[in-house]
Image (spheres, rainbow, N blue to C red):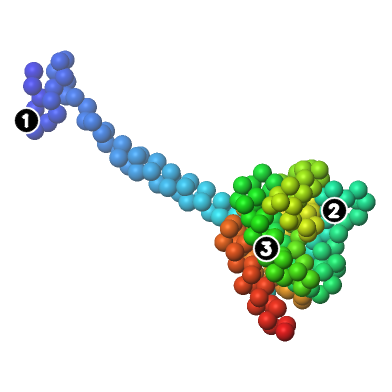
Amino acid sequence: MSGSPGGPPATPTGLPRPPLWPKGQWSRLLGLFAVAVAATVVSFALVSHISHPLLPGGATAPAVKLLPAGDSSAVPLDVFATAAGRPVVLEFFETTCQVCQHEVRPMCDAHARHAGRVDFYGIDAARESSATVAAFGHDQAGGCQSWPLLLDPKSDVLRAYSVTVVPTVYVVDAQRHVVYSGTGEAGVAGLDQALGLIEGAHG
């Protein structure tokens, strides 16, 4: 038996076939799609909120008081007190980070160009052991790394400096203001220009 003219085809029992998309199905599908889009937007917003941007230029640099790797004295080093008015470079790194390993030599070269005028410090960003971090300092780049490598076992300094990737570098001037920040190879490559501007401004 055929269906009514213009209507859906009949089933073998003679009843009209149900439409492919029942009435209201489209609205439900659109509703689910809207929910999925909203969930994606919220997830992106949450991730963006968690991944804080680096500290802006002019911000006061948070205190850095950490134990040096391989130092059995167990006396925290106060970076800005030790610098005694000199600019400071902070590099956040991990020993297993290939980019960090590759950037040891450029960091050493920058350190050599500004020796005696700028203090350099490395801060372990992976809660690694003192022995592991100390070995990294001795073994990398033919032993050129000669500045203190500091341990941050509770990641307090890591969070204070909004570090989410390694390497991350900061330059802090003699007044303890952030004057430069960057990440990855480009961040390390920008050190010389930032330090040159500081040294030029102070004669």
Q: Which is nearer the N-term, disc 2 or disc 1? A: 1
Q: Nearer the viewer, mark 3 or mark 1?
A: 3
Q: Give the mark nearest the N terminus, 3 or 1.
A: 1
Quadrant of the snapshot with the N terminus: top left
Residue at the extreme bottom of the image, as rendered: 203
Q: Is residue 100 above or below residue 119?
A: above
Q: Residue at x 62, y 52 (%)?
A: 102
Q: Secondary structure at mark 2?
A: strand
**In this view of the protein, can residue 162 be seen by the observer?**
no
Helix, strand or loop at mark 1: loop
Q: Quadrant of the C terminus?
A: bottom right
Is residue 101 left or right of 71 when viewed as pictured?
Answer: left
Q: Which residue is mark 1?
A: 5
Residue 79 higher or lower than 177, as above or below? above
In the rendered structure, which amino acid carries the disc numbered 2?
Answer: Leu
Depth check, mark 2 against mark 1: the one in front is 2
Name the residue type under label 1. Answer: Pro
Residue in the foreground of this view, choosing between 90 and 46 = 90
Q: CA distance from mark 3 to mark 1?
A: 86 Å
Instruction: From the top left corner, tell me how far across and down residue 121 is, in percent.
Output: 76, 60
Which residue is denoted by mark 3 in the rendering? 109
